[in-house]
Amino acid sequence: MRIDIVTIFPEFFDVLNLSLLGKARQSGLIELGVHNLRDHTYDRHHSVDDTPYGGGAGMVMKAEPWGAALDAILGAEIPRVDAATDGPILIFPSPAGDQFTQAMARELSLEQHLVFGCGRYEGIDQRVVDHYEARGRVRLVSLGDYVLNGGEVAVMAMIEAIGRLIPGVVGNPDSLVEESHEDGLLEYPSYTKPSSWRGLDVPQVLLSGNHGAISTWRHQQQIERTERVRPDLMSPDLLPPANAKQSPSRRR
Ligand code: JEW
């Protein structure tokens, strides 16, 4: 997968050289380009922002640098016939976007080319989104219902969630299917040595060697935990009838 990022803080993405994603880059599974928006300014002061039309607080990112930066990545061609279903996806993090989910990460991990535009200030001139929507696939994506100072942190989270779903990036593919959200349930609790710590014992079943019992216990734990902390994720057909009428306990 090819990933391009446009930002006024390219150094922010230096951490992508580390850990799992860094290895994926070295092995060529992920090709990353980080582009400084300011390299696409042609005025004396390299301005990327200006005051909003209509007044109001704060500054808005100017359309011209965004147009120049994105054209340099995407090419400056007129819309292609299949632009709605094919070609790169341009993603703008935004508090007004569709909620980023594991399902969206899964979909995006199948793409060949993602381009992320990181806004700052009060956001980007709306015409940038409008223009590129007419040329291809554009998505506004929200990390969640809270306000960040810009798109960089959101892009970092999205790249981590997407990157680890690319075959070969995470060493053991089993750890991908077993984990939270892939089956609509939260994780079961995990334990490692020692078997007793500060008076707290590892549940006996995990020491039993009975893999059937362990598997059943873990699934029960997933269902209980999901019902307790994220009932919104709970699909009724996964609930055993005995459990369905029980009121959620306050434990965590
Ligand atoms: C987020 C990009 C760029 C995403 C999530 N836009 C805007 C905006 C900002 C502050 C107040 C009001 C609007 C700052 N901002 C961003 C915020 C993404 C930008 C500028 C973002 N939360 N916040 N999920």
Image: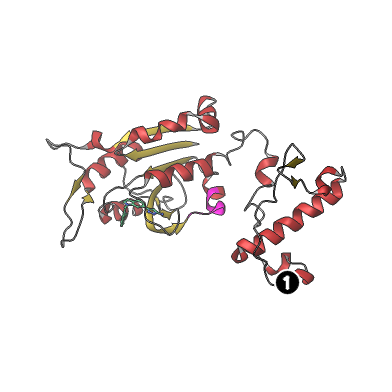
Q: Which residue is drawn at 27% across and 54% down?
A: 122
Residue placed furthest toward the left:
44
Question: In this picture, is 69 found above or below 91?
Answer: above
* Percent position of residue 133, x then y: 35, 54
Residue 23 lies within the magenta run: no
Residue denoted by label 1: 244
* Percent position of residue 135, x then y: 35, 50
Q: Left of 148 or right of it: where is 112?
A: right
Q: What stretch is highlighted in magenta?
A: 100-105
In front of the other: 250 or 135? 250
Q: In which quarter of the image is the C terminus?
A: bottom right
Q: Residue at x 73, y 74 (%)?
A: 245
Residue placed furthest toward the bottom:
245
- Quarter residue 35 falls in: top left
In front of the other: 243 or 191? 191
Mark 1: few, some, or many residues within 10 Å (few <14, many ≥20)?
Answer: few
In front of the other: 102 or 56? 56
In front of the other: 10 or 204? 204
Question: In this picture, is 53 found above or below 77?
Answer: below
Residue type marked 1: Ala
* Percent position of residue 44, x then y: 11, 35
